[in-house]
Image: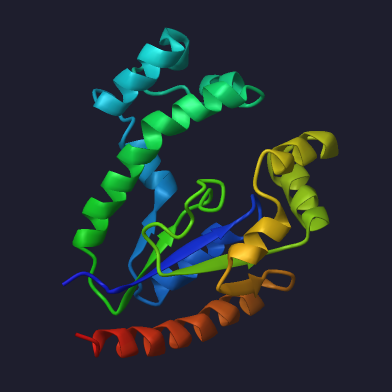
Amino acid sequence: MPPKLRIGLTGGIASGKSTAAQRFSELGVPVIDADQASRAVVAPGTPGLLKVIERFGRAVQGSDGTLDRRSLRNLIFSDAAARADLNAILHPLIRAQMQVEMASAVGPYVVLAIPLLIEGGSARAGVDRILVIDVDEAVQIQRLTARDGCTPDEARAVLEAQASRDARRSAADDILANTGTLVELQQGVDRLHEHYLDLASQIQGLP
């Protein structure tokens, strides 16, 4: 029987979402990653890839038949209508893929790692609680410039294309600040793990 408690894990870019998800996985919690699902639904030969090419043209397909994510990102980054079209194609496919993976998940609870959970407009759909990995925007910019080699202005543009920090915090049931060391972040996940185990045990006792 799939887990009854579904935790939606999200946060802004360079907030530490992946590190938190990895820690949950190390603790034995099933983690279903929307980014991985998004890659699966546009693998070569899939209906998802064909729909994307049909909408955006062959320029978004690499010579090896895979989706050229950089070209696609360049097309949609400053075009809200194109971005909405892409979301309309991919989001239902990604949700369906994650549902398939969740059906085979085993454990008291499951973590759904969804970077754009808040931006999706229906954050509560498909999750029982929202966990936000929170970090100051100045730290995000610092991490982005160091990680991706972009300028501070380019990093700010990326942040502006996402939901605001306030919007994520307002939607959250749980907030984990990632302002310290890696060990402190892992310890924060460990504490939440115990909390979620308690919640899951209460839910499992319900009819």
| In the displayed structure image, the side of residue 28 where residue 101 appears, left or right | left
Nearest the viewer among 118 and 186 is: 118
For residue 48, say whether it is visible.
yes
The image quarter containing residue 37 is top left
Image height check: is 121 above or below 84?
A: below
Residue at 26%, 53% in the rendered image: 99
Quadrant for the N terminus in the image: bottom left
As drawn, is 101 to the left or to the right of 74? left
Outermost residue toward the top in this view: 58
Relative image position of residue 187 (x, y in whole percent): 58, 82
Q: What residue is shown at x 31% (from left), y 35% (from top)?
A: 41
User: Which residue occupies 73% across, 73% down?
Assistant: 180
* Near-viewer residue (175 or 206): 206
Q: Residue at x 74, y 53 (%)?
A: 140
The image shows residue 93, relative to residue 130, as above or below, that is above
Residue 167 x %, y %: 67, 57
